[in-house]
Amino acid sequence: MPHKSGSVIVRSDGWPAVPKATVLTTAVGDDATKALEAVRQLQEFCVNSELRAVSEARLVGLSWAQIGARLGQSKQAVWVRYAGYDPHGGIMEMD
C-alpha cells in the first residue's frame, strides 16, 4: 500500500514496514512541515501495526478483554474500534 511519498508501508509478510530512522529524526527536527509529515507517517505505521496485531490476536484466540488489557483499553473500546474488521477475510466477533 503506497502512501504519498511512494514508499511501501506493508512488507511482503503483511506487517507494516517500520519507518526509516530518518523519519524519527525528522519528526523532532526544525522544519515544521517536514516534522508534521514524519509524524503522520509514524501515526500511520502505528495504526496499521495495531490493526494487524489485533487481527492476529483474534486469530490465535485472544479475547477482546485480553487484547484491551494489553493495549491499555477496555474490552468494549477495542471491540467498538475493531469488531467486523479482519484483513484475513473472516469476521471478528465479540466474545
Image: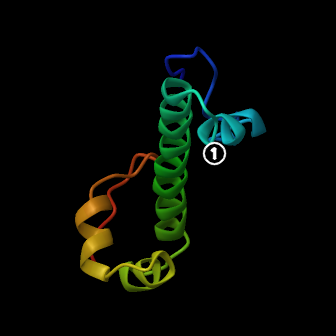
Q: Position of residue 12 (x, y in %)?
A: 70, 33
* Image spot of residue 27 (x, y percent): 60, 39
Query: Is residue 84 at all visible to an observer of this figure?
Result: yes
Q: Residues within 10 Å of mark 1 (few under 14, many from 20)?
A: some
Q: How is the image coloured?
A: rainbow
The C terminus - image quarter: bottom left
Examine the rendered structure and indicate whether residue 57 appears above or below residue 15. Answer: below
Q: Residue at x 61, y 34 (%)?
A: 10
The residue shown at (56%, 72%) is 60
Can residue 95 be seen here? no
Picture quadrant of residue 64: bottom left
83 to 74, vertically: above or below: above
Picture residue at 74% right of the left edge, 35% below the top: 20
Amino acid type at mark 1: Trp
Residue 47: percent from left, percent from top: 46, 50
Q: Is residue 47 left or right of residue 17?
A: left
Which quadrant of the structure image shows residue 67?
bottom left
Q: In the displayed structure, does residue 16 sit left or right of residue 77? A: right
How many marks the image carries: the answer is 1
**Residue 74: image x %, image y %?**
31, 82
Q: Nearer the viewer, residue 44 or 82?
A: 44
In what element is the residue under mark 1? loop
Relative to 46, does residue 65 appear above or below in the rendering?
below
What residue is shown with label 1?
15
Task: Please tell me which residue is depicted at 22% across the width and 66% down the height of the picture.
Answer: 80
Q: State the image quarter where residue 11 is shown.
A: top right
- Which residue extends farthest front? 30
Which of 29/88 is in front?
A: 29
